[in-house]
Image (cartoon, rainbow, N blue to C red):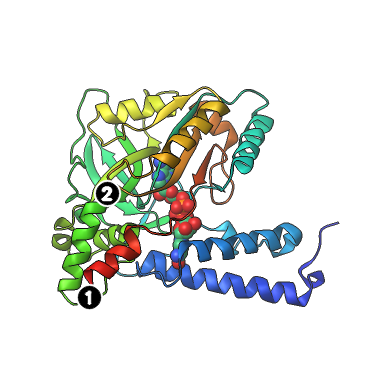
């Protein structure tokens, strides 16, 4: 029989409420103000404790729990935009055991071998959705709470490498592509130096600097920040011709002139996933931008559709997160530039 809210011990429900409030407050500072007040590790610890409490007391897992939601409500500073399809977060794996559990769950649900898998880098930036109609960029929006994002079209138009028009003769009538907007490490240093020169607080890390740079009321400010974008998915593809694999989709997006990473790999099985994860554990600083892990996706689109999503994340993808680094660009750069 399911446990009712009333039968949850008082201490447990008040701890749950306390954690939920801490997380909501942190979400507001992180997603809306671009100025976090706690470390990601501390935040992840609160979320883990919330999930554990809800695992033991499922009645605490209400739709308004932070564990069931994406991001934060949008800022009133921007015009709201409804996404063509919900933008999601990703479930996390922090060790090989949970990565194996993810693969086992995928194979249990689909009742077959789920390989090949597409492995790619988890870029530490912010998610943006771009809509192209008849090949023309008509709208760009932040993820927001997953359903409603913020209209940042003029700002995204200033990002080098984001095409205003798609190329080729197979461009769909309407396509929504998703990707990560980020600041390369060198660009982050320059932005923070400039911010400090202007007498303002430096950004805590490249992710927040990218979000703060993109979410500007004046796109001329965004234009001065060396933002980049890499696309990693589609939210809508109107008409025929969508490839049957994630990797095929990337090939098409690249052919349309969109910026696609050259570091993704398609691997046949778990062995291949493990090799990729271990390679980038060793080569974490090879890319010019910060990564916080690796994303593993089921490559076949048909299987992705079959697996669907939970309330906040696709079942067909998982983020393997590397441990936070003791000494990284974040604190060191702030100290240098103050
Ligand atoms: P997430 O960052 O763990 O993962 C989901 C996001 O990964 C996607 O929305 C997408 O934008 C991004 N991503 C990057 N590369 C990708 C790729 N190759 N393919 C697909 N997606 C890719 O989840 P989240 O919901 O954006 O944020 C939660 C995390 O943010 C927390 O774990 C925490 O680390 C941090 N956070 C920190 C604070 C704080 O106060 N310090 C507050 C809120 C969130």
Q: Which mark is residue 172?
A: none
Q: In which quarter of the image is the N terminus?
A: bottom right
Direction from residue 196 to residue 98 in the image, left or right: right
Q: What element carries label 1?
A: loop
> Residue 123: in sight, yes or no?
yes
Q: Which residue is drawn at 20% across and 72% down?
A: 196
Q: Residue at x 33, y 36 (%)?
A: 175
**N-terminal-most mark, 2 or 1:** 2
The crowd level at tag 1 (other Cα within 10 Å; few <14, some 14-19, many 20+) is few
Residue 143 in picture, x, y percent from top left: 39, 54
Depth check: give the residue in front, 316 or 332. Answer: 332
Depth check: give the residue in front, 128 or 149. Answer: 128
Q: Is ligand 1 less than 8 Å from the beta carbon at label 1?
A: no
Q: In which quarter of the image is the C terminus?
A: bottom left
Q: Residue furthest right?
A: 1
> Residue 84: in sight, yes or no?
no
On screen, residue 307 above or below 184: above
Residue 26 in picture, x, y percent from top left: 47, 70
Q: Which residue is drawn at 35% across and 33% down?
A: 263
Residue 11 in picture, x, y percent from top left: 74, 76
Q: Which mark is residue 200?
A: 1
Depth check: give the residue in front, 140 or 71. Answer: 71
Residue 171 falls in image quadrant: top left
* Real-space CA distance between mark 2 and mark 1, rounded to the nearest whole angstrom: 31 Å
Q: What element carries label 2?
A: strand
Direction from residue 332 to residue 93 in the image, left or right: right
Residue 316 in picture, x, y percent from top left: 55, 36
Direction from residue 229 to residue 97 in the image, left or right: right
Q: Which mark is residue 139?
A: 2
């Amino acid at each position: 029989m399911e446990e009712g809210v009333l039968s949850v011990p008082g201490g447990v429900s008040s701890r749950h409420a306390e954690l939920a409030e801490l997380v909501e407050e942190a979400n507001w500072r992180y997603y809306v103000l671009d100025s976090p007040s706690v470390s990601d590790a501390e935040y992840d610890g609160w979320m883990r404790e919330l999930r554990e409490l809800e695992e033991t007391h499922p009645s605490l897992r209400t739709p308004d729990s932070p564990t069931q939601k994406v991001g934060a409500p949008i800022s009133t500073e921007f015009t709201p935009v409804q996404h063509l399809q919900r933008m999601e977060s990703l479930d996390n794996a922090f060790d090989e055991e949970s990565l194996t559990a993810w693969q086992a769950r995928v194979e249990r649900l689909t009742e077959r071998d789920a390989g090949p898998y597409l492995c790619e880098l988890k870029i530490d930036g912010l998610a943006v959705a771009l809509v192209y109609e008849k090949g023309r960029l008509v709208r760009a929006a932040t993820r927001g709470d997953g359903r409603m994002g913020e209209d940042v079209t003029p700002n995204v138009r200033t990002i080098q490498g984001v095409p205003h028009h798609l190329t080729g003769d197979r461009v769909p009538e309407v396509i929504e592509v998703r990707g990560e907007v980020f600041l390369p490490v060198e660009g982050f240093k320059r932005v923070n130096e400039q911010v400090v020169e202007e007498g303002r607080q430096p950004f805590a890390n490249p992710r927040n600097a990218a979000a703060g740079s993109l979410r500007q009321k004046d796109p001329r400010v965004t234009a001065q920040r060396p933002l980049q974008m890499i696309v990693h998915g589609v939210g809508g593809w109107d008409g025929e011709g969508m490839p049957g694999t994630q990797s095929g989709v990337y090939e098409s997006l690249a052919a349309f002139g969109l910026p696609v990473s050259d570091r993704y790999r398609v691997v046949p099985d778990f062995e291949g996933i493990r090799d990729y994860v271990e390679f980038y554990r060793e080569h974490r600083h090879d890319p010019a931008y910060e990564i916080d892990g690796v994303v593993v996706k089921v490559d076949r689109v048909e299987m992705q559709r079959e697996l669907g999503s939970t309330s906040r994340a696709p079942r067909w993808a998982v983020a393997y997160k590397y441990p936070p680094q003791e000494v990284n660009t974040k604190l060191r750069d702030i100290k240098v530039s103050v």
